[in-house]
Image (spheres, rainbow, N blue to C red):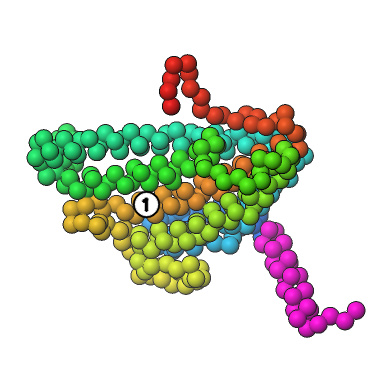
């Protein structure tokens, strides 16, 4: 059978891609062992090159395949021993619930702080707020007013997966409700693989370097090789972003970049948890729906 040059090139590209993928999976075991056995190479931040290694590997192909291989290993073992997969689901959903329930209190703190700001401004006519004993922490009113955005960002970024577990996200349903139970689980699994996990990975890749470009100089780039970053380490120094929107305003905006990375990591973790849950429910049928799901409930007399 004759094959056109274009078809041959496509075939070679597919074969090369498959070989590369398998090779990266195999190398992930070595990369993980090397990272664990030599922690000072990337965790000793008194060493400038260690910081640059941490920046590089934090959003690298090597890290991606270590995480992917770990998830695949857990899943394959869980296919054989499903009780283990249920334990993983319970652990990951418990992590999402615990984190969300903790940082949901940021909403209450935000309300209390706003009330204090209004009281200080309107009743006491003070331009600043001083907190503490002995050596007080004193900032302008505008600093505390702009800091409210941070609490809001905490709720959005760190309570997102908690809301997912609780079924609180808005969902547009065109045909999902009318299909069979196992078909729903297949749709959920494909949704995790094609939308949820890739979105989280892309957000992490951009968010990681966006964060570090506001923490250190020379500014790292996603296109920099490890050798290039190690060469840049000769001029390395910390340069944490402290510029606010107003002269006396909130100056910790680098924390929003940290929250962006935390959001991406938590969405990816829950994509894995939701995929595992969907698979287990697909295998076991309707009787397993919402098994071990820790949803909030109202006691008698309580109002949401």
Q: Quadrant of residue 102?
A: top left
On the picture, is 183 further left or further right than 37? right
Q: In the image, residue 291 lies at what x, y percent?
A: 65, 29
Q: Which residues are magenta?
A: 1-26
Q: Quadrant of residue 120?
A: top left
| Residue furthest top in the image | 300
Relative to the observer, which residue lies in front, 266 or 155?
155
Question: Which residue is at a point 46% across and 52% down the rendered structure image?
Answer: 261
Q: Say which element carries label 1.
A: helix
Q: In the image, residue 68 lies at what x, y percent?
A: 64, 53
Residue 279 visible to the viewer: no
Residue 199 among magenta residues = no
Residue 164 visible to the viewer: yes
Q: In the image, residue 45 lies at what x, y percent?
A: 40, 56
Relative to the observer, which residue lies in front, 136 or 11?
11
- Name the main secondary structure of what is drawn in magenta: helix
**Relative to 75, is 212 above or below?**
below
Question: Which residue is at a point 24% across and 57% down the rendered structure image?
Answer: 245
| Residue furthest right in the image | 1
The residue carrying mark 1 is: 256
Q: In the image, residue 42 lies at what x, y percent?
A: 48, 57
């Amino acid at each position: 059978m004759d094959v056109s040059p274009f078809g041959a090139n496509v075939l070679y590209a597919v074969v090369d891609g498959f070989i590369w993928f398998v090779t990266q999976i195999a190398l992930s075991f070595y990369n993980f062992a090397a990272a664990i056995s030599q922690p000072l190479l990337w965790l000793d931040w008194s060493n400038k090159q260690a910081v640059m290694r941490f920046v590089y590997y934090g959003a690298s192909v090597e890290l991606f395949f270590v995480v992917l291989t770990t998830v695949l290993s857990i899943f394959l073992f869980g296919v054989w021993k499903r009780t283990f997969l249920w334990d993983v689901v319970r652990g990951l959903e418990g992590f999402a619930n615990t984190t969300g329930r903790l940082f949901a209190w940021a909403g209450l703190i935000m309300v209390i702080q706003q009330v204090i700001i209004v009281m200080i401004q309107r009743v006491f006519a003070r331009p600043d707020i001083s907190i503490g004993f002995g050596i007080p922490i004193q900032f302008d009113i505008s600093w505390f007013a702009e800091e409210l955005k941070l609490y809001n960002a905490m709720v959005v970024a760190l309570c997102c997966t908690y809301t997912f577990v609780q079924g609180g996200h808005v969902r547009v349903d065109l045909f999902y409700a009318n299909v069979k139970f196992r078909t729903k689980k297949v749709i959920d699994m494909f949704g995790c693989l094609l939308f949820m996990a890739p979105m989280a990975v892309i957000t992490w890749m951009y968010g990681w370097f966006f964060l570090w470009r506001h923490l250190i100089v020379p500014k790292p780039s996603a296109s920099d090789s490890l050798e290039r970053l190690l060469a840049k380490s000769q001029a390395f120094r910390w340069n944490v972003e402290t510029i606010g929107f107003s002269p006396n305003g909130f100056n910790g905006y680098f924390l929003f970049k940290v929250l962006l990375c935390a959001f991406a990591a938590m969405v990816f973790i829950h994509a894995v948890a939701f995929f595992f849950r969907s698979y287990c429910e697909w295998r076991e049928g309707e009787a397993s729906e919402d098994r071990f799901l820790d949803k909030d409930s109202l006691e008698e007399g309580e109002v949401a």
